[in-house]
Every structure is written in structure tokens, then in C-alpha cells.
Amino acid sequence: MTEAGIKIDGQPVGSVSKGFYFSVDRSPGRYRITCVNPVSMDYEAEVQIEGGQTYYFGIGVLQTGAPGQNLLNQAVAGSSGRQLPSTSLKSAFSGTALYQIDTAEGPAVISQLKPK
């Protein structure tokens, strides 16, 4: 994957590629995040955002295999964290998935990336 667009509640907010990040501020509430993959189906997930918190999300390979294979896929794809459950059946045909990165690990992950 070269670049993936990111939408929040259907509105484009930016795009990411390997080695880069961007940030978005949102008020507390429930949001639908979509990873727009140019070569496969989009991946959608819903997240609850609480006030005063920082959340970290990543894009990685869709985990559909055995746990050992999933760990290998994450290592190869550079993703980390917990795969967010999809809110769309179409996401099963996506080449990517959205991951929530643990808040304690987020700053270390971001420090290895460049702002976009």
C-alpha cells in the first residue's frame, strides 16, 4: 500500500503512507473512521472518543489468519495495536485494517514517524 485516505464520519481528514502520521482534533463522541484503500474495499470502524484523551490509530494488514500468522503480518506491515472491529461486511474484502494503538505506546510509535 502506498497511501491510504482517512475519513471521519464520511469526511476526508487526511492521508497516510508508511513512515508518516497526521493528527486530528475531535470533541468527545462516537465516530466512524474509514481507511480508504485505493486497491481494495474500504475498512470502517467506530470508536468512542472521551474528553481529555489522546488516541492513536494505525493502518495494517487485515488479520484473518492464525494468531502466529497475524503477528507476522503485523511485523511485516509495520502495524501495531489491536485491530478494531469492522462496522461493514465490505471490510472483509479490504486489504487493510484499522488498529488502535495502546495509549502508553502511542508516543513511542509516533516518534518513529514523520509528520505529513
Image (tube, helix red, strand yellow):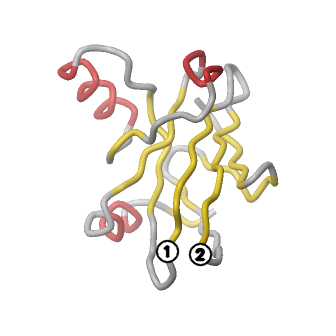
Residue at image coords 35%, 65%:
106
Q: Quadrant of residue 105?
A: bottom left
Instruction: Residue at 64%, 75% (x, y): give it.
Output: 25
Quarter-wise, where is residue 3 in the image? Answer: top right
Q: Position of residue 44 (x, y in %)?
A: 62, 38
Which of the image's four quarters has the C terminus? bottom right
Q: Are marks 1 and 2 in contact (CB under 8 Å)?
A: yes
Q: Which residue is mark 1?
A: 50
Judge from the rendering whether residue 75 lies leftward or rightward of residue 114; answer left or right.
Answer: left
Whole-angstrom CA distance, mark 1 to mark 2, is 5 Å
Q: Is residue 68 above or below residue 24?
A: above
Structural crowding at the residue carrying mark 1, measured as other residues with C-alpha within 10 Å and reported as few (<14), some (14–19) or many (≥20): few
Query: Which residue is disc 2 drawn over?
Result: 28
Q: Is residue 91 above or below residue 97?
A: above
What amino acid is found at the position of numbered circle 1 in the picture?
Glu
Relative to 3, residue 47 above or below: below
Q: Quadrant of residue 39?
A: top right
* Residue 110 at x, y percent in the picture: 41, 65
Which residue, as the protein is rendered here, is positioned at the far right?
Answer: 11
